[in-house]
Image (spheres, rainbow, N blue to C red):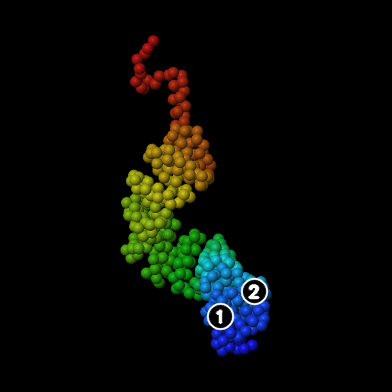
Amino acid sequence: MQGEFLVNQGNYALAILEFQDALDLDPNAPTIHVSIADAYRRLGKNKRAENHLQVAIELNPDEVEAYEILGKIYILQKRLPQAEAAFRELTRLDPDNIDHLYALADLARLQKQWDIAIDYYLEAYRVNSMVVKGLEQALQISLATNKFERAEEICDLLLEEEPENEKYLETLRDLALFDNDFEKALKTIQILETTRGPTVELLIQKSALYEELDDSENALKEILKAFGRDSLNSDVLNRLVNLLLNDKQIDRAENYNQLLIEKFPDDVRGFINTGFLALNRNKPEDAIVALSSCVEKFPNEFTVHYLLGTSYYQVKDYGNAEVYLSQALGIFPDSRNTKHNLALIYDQIGEWSKSDELYLDLVATDSTDAQAFNNYAYSLADRNEDFELALELAKNAIRLVPKSAPYLDTIGWIYYKLNDYEKAIEFIRESLSIDSSNPVIQDHLNAVIKAKSMHVVDKGIQQAGITDTTKATLPFKE
């Protein structure tokens, strides 16, 4: 046809005249309407092109080319819902054409309909599993929009196509770690090992995952393999020390930690480990000596200040404990453990306005912090202040952790202070049934039982009308 030749030559105006002549002869030919519409589109006359395309579709609802051109026009005009409708018709007419599905996916992306876009890319993959481009696009969207469950599903599909693709394996490992699926992460690393070989990095990762899975034997086994490959790797040495420490192999841990300090004197982890090792031997004095020697060298290291403050607290040097824990809190203001310890120190030295401020902050920022509720309640009761608030705080602690011996003891002690001896005995006895060797709880129970006995005696004296001769009496009246 002469019109088609003119379109190919770029002479769209003359082509339109040729197509118009053809339409005069056959106005119900949908293909001619499509051709003249295409020429109008190329001239930028989209409205006229759209009119002819609508006529073509009315004449033939299955006119694929009409929908294709219409979709392009709508995209150009940013009429995205109409473009989407056109490409949906195309997928109905030609379900095996993945280009139409990709177009729908791109349209969904433009409208930030992320799940719909992912669905279209997956559908394209189901139509033609030889083309993984769509899966990679779906993976990128899933990761960028934090849809990690979908990302993991897509990674599994990609690995079915390329089982040894390291990029996919690393992504799947990271997703499994984010989801705390340590078994899957471990299996993924084991596959990576088959392609890369057992590198030190992978051995460290495997060791960490075995530890998360409570398999300390294999965690230690893997890190020893890493040590065999690189005995002067600071990460390997540090991990080895910590695993041995957790396994109560203190002597071995100290040997490896000494190597860490000797070979890496500027690595703070060796000094921190020394502190932990001393505390594990119940020697806070040794921890103080070790950490004091490096605190100036690492002035901004939170753990050094925290452990030093904790060690001073254990030897009841509350002044230094406060100094170092305050410095730790300055480095890491959100540290709840530091706030807890500082509050206990302020309780000990009677600076209750400071301890109250910390307790109020702890319970306000975490309504599940049972320890904060309990410690604040005990502090108030112990100084005979605001028993009503103390009781409410203690009830919250019990609600969160019903079978905690310290928390049951606290609420029992508050009831004792309120002279409700029956409830006091009930809670403290339950506390003692959980921790029968705790001398503080036993002392509390003895005190409550004694107070109850005295109360019964006093009540009996009053009921019998016996005068307490130790007190001043009113004049006798007949």
- What kind of element bears circle 1? helix
> In the image, what residue type sits under mark 1?
Tyr
| Residue under pointer 1 | 40
Place of residue 221 in the rendered image (x, y in percent of width and height, measured from the top left): 54, 68
Q: Which quadrant of the rendered structure holds the N terminus?
A: bottom right
Residue 178 lies, with reference to residue 94, above or below; the image says above
- What kind of element bears circle 2? helix
Q: Quadrant of residue 389?
A: top left
Q: Nearer the viewer, residue 34 or 398?
A: 34
Residue 449 lies, with reference to residue 345, above or below; the image says above
Tell me the tag on residue 27. Answer: none
Which residue corresponds to the image point at 64% horizontal and 81% vertical from the top-left?
23
Would residue 478 be found to the left or right of residue 370 on screen?
left
Disc 1 and disc 2 in contact, CB within 8 angstroms? no
| Residue under pointer 2 | 57
Place of residue 25 in the rendered image (x, y in percent of width and height, measured from the top left): 66, 83
Which residue corresponds to the image point at 60% horizontal and 76% vertical from the top-left?
52
Would residue 115 be found to the left or right of residue 271 on screen?
right
Place of residue 112 in the rendered image (x, y in percent of width and height, measured from the top left): 52, 67
Q: Nearer the viewer, residue 198 or 335?
A: 335
> In the image, what residue type sits under mark 2?
Ile
Place of residue 131 in the rendered image (x, y in percent of width and height, measured from the top left): 61, 77
